[in-house]
Amino acid sequence: MVYMFPRRLELPKSSFFLLGPRGTGKTTWVQAQLPRAHRVDLLDEARYQGYLADPSLFAAELRAVPAASWVAVDEVQRLPGLLNEVHRAIEERRLRFALTGSSARKLRRGGVNLLGGRARQLTMFPFVPEELGPDFRLERALRHGTLPLVWDSPEPERTLEAYVQTYLKEEIQAEGAARNLAGFARFLPIAGLMHGQALNVSSIARDAGVARQTVAGYVQILEDTLLATTVGAFEARLRIRERRHPKFYLVDPGLARAVKRQLGPLTAEERGPLLEGFVLLLLRFYQERTALCEDIGYWAPAEAQSTEVDFVLTRKRARLAIEVKATRTLRPADMRGLRAIADLPGLRRRVLVYLGQQPLATPDGIDAWPIAHLARTLAEGALWP
């Protein structure tokens, strides 16, 4: 199936890794971009078992591919040892490879050949508003997320439930990522509750009655399997000390709801973290696609628990602060964090993203933007003034 929505991703001219969670459309995109490529699907169990028993079969198969051709290898993390043959084929036969994967866990382990810089590393994200165009609906995005697999489904809630079960079976159990599958399954709802929160592993371990190392390992598994990301504390070097715990996010709002088994109508308590996570998805997307910034952090002074700025973007010596509020009517308290960070050196713009319909500006220079305005500004490359 070819998705009807075009993806904002250009085909590299040379070999590349394309990583992203299952259901983001990696294979679909590669097939559309490279319809004549020789394809190797490592989800084909017979093929996988054949290569596992005799890796030389893969080398022999590559020798039959015409020189300088494209080869697409799906789910390469299942047999990372094949990358040695990929490396050889690039060097000796000028083959070009599109290597997709839904987990970086095995690829990050010591000894894995990552082609010595001969392949770019790209990420496939869930849909963003620019890709969905007029079909984008914020309420739908927050409730069910924008994973292409789910967005195209006539039954998104059932698809999300099946997605979590498939993840446990194929990413966790099959890959042996967690020794205690039942324990990891019990941890997932906690991960959903952690979405958009500061990640205090010790506190979670105490509440859950498990070892700190266990919780840290589970969080690492979610990051390695590309379902979660963390945002570190920004080193503002203002006169007050910043908190150090990173903030934790699932990569998609629908996924955050699915793992905690809460797929009904959105509640008021959910909207803030879900909207914040969706804004992070946009920032990460354009960070890779357009070099929006070099780093994304958050700022929260320890001495003022209610003062926070959700995202601080860094580009060279310039800074940009973004606060997210799931409200349609702005109050002075909503601006507290952005006003507290006003003296940050290099600060070029302060933006408050909210659920209203009209872009606004305060007398002291804070821009208040609806999510659609933020998305359009990012797509146009106009976020930095």
Image (spheres, helix red, strand yellow):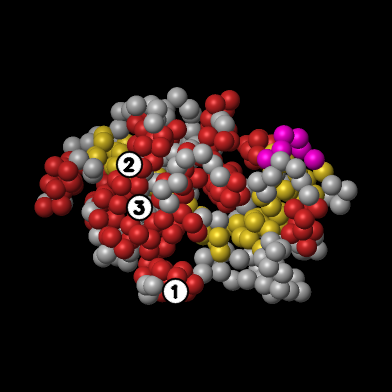
Front of the two marks 1 and 2: 1
Q: Nearer the viewer, residue 362 or 343?
A: 362
Label tally: 3
Q: Earlier in the sequence, mark 1 or mark 2?
A: 2
Residue designated by label 3: 103
Residue designated by label 1: 206
Q: Which residues are magenta?
A: 355-360
- Taking 259 as reference, is 8 left or right? right
Question: On the image, which quarter does residue 31 sit in?
Answer: top left
What residue sits 23% from the left and 54% below the top?
174
User: Quick one: label 1, few (<14), some, or many (20+) residues within 10 Å?
Assistant: few
Amino acid type indicated by mark 1:
Arg
Q: Nearer the viewer, residue 183 or 294?
A: 183
Q: Earlier in the sequence, mark 2 or mark 3?
A: 3
Task: Check the image and name the residue furthest to the right.
Answer: 363
Q: Earlier in the sequence, mark 1 or mark 3?
A: 3
Amino acid type indicated by mark 3:
Ser
